[in-house]
Image (spheres, rainbow, N blue to C red):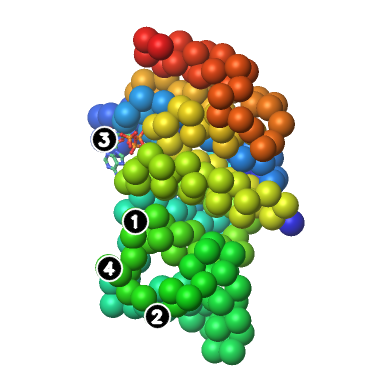
Amino acid sequence: MTGGIALEGVSKRFGDLQVLTDVNLQVAEGQFGVIVGPSGCGKSTILRMLAGLERPDAGRVLKDGKPVTGPGPDRILIFQEHALYPWRTVAGNVAFGLELAGVRPADRAARVADVLARVGLGGFERYYPHQLSGGMRQRAAIARALVMDPEVLLLDEPYGALDAMTRLTMQNELLRLWQGSGKTMLMVTHDIEEAIYLADRLFVMSPRPGRVLRQIEVELPRPRSRTDARMVRLREEVLGLLQIAA
Ligand SMILES: Nc1ncnc2c1ncn2[C@@H]1O[C@H](COP(=O)(O)OP(=O)(O)OP(=O)(O)O)[C@@H](O)[C@H]1O
């Protein structure tokens, strides 16, 4: 499977607002990249560019070394407002993309059942979104992306709306889904512990106009311990870069 993604010298403005300047970032195939940075520094804009929903004013946005020219089934963006269709069941939501892609009903059912089991939603096929907890809704959103078997998952604050305990569980579930999948991940989060716990490669951004202040290779073995002294030191380093008092 392929799936390396990169931004090379990317700048972007919206009207008079310079949002990104000269952003360089690379996540190799199968790697877990995480972006942290101040509010409004352009993190979501980076993900939207990689999803093909925005274009850079300057520089290049690449997937497998080729410019991204628009949305595609190889790159799926998941965000906090998981936007499940309220009138469709869990299975119906997860099947939606397969229906659009013209996958036959029997194959669809098998793929939906498989992915729902993998995210821990087996047995909830017939539930509607309003009958699920926040964590379950986010699992359904992840299932909806995974069922399309994308090479790249772009995650925009996927757990931002969840309580702290559910968040920790969801992080471990995400790692379990990712490990061995060969999929490339790029997540935006405001939670520095989450970033360090998940990342192979961490990008710390400056305030707007956003650029990458520091790229940190998080070489701690997995499974990681959240209380490991090296994690604590990394957290201090990131807080220092963001100029937040520890
Ligand atoms: N389509 C758009 N039109 C105009 N301005 C936009 C558009 N998209 C983003 N912006 C502006 O670009 C800036 C960066 O937005 P973006 O959502 O990328 O930041 P962010 O780092 O993800 O922020 P946060 O952490 O608060 O979610 C913001 O000031 C926002 O108002």
In the image, the residue with mark 3 has its CB under 8 Å from the nearest atom of ligand 1: yes
CA separation, marks 2 and 3?
45 Å
Type of the residue with mark 3:
Gly
Residue 231 as seen in the image, left or right of residue 39: right
**For marks 4 and 3 on the same chain, the one whose residue lies earlier in the sequence:** 3
Q: Name the secondary structure under disc 2.
A: loop
Label placed on residue 130:
4
Query: Which image quarter has ligand 1?
Result: top left
**Horizontal placement of 225 versus 193: left or right?**
right
Q: CA distance from mark 2 to mark 1?
A: 17 Å
First of labels 3, 1 by sequence position? 3
Q: Which residue is mark 1?
A: 134
Say which of marks 2 and 3 sits in front. 2
Q: Quadrant of residue 132?
A: bottom left
SS of the residue at dot 1?
A: helix
Q: Position of residue 102 (x, y in %)?
A: 54, 83
- Are the residues at dot 2 and dot 1 in contact (C-beta closer than 8 Å)? no
Q: Amino acid at mark 1?
A: Gly
Residue type, label 4: His
Q: In the image, what residue occupies the spot 43% across and 74% down?
A: 124
Name the quadrant of the C terminus.
Answer: top left
Q: Which residue is mark 3?
A: 15
Q: Where does the image place residue 226, in percent across and percent down from the top left?
A: 56, 29
The numbered dot on residue 170 is none
Could you tell whether 64 is left or right of 37 in the image?
A: right
Residue 57 visible, this orientation: no
Q: Is residue 185 above or below residue 113?
A: above
Location of residue 117 (image quadrant):
bottom right
**Residue shown at the point (52%, 44%) measured from the top left:** 171
Which x, y percent locates residue 137? 38, 61
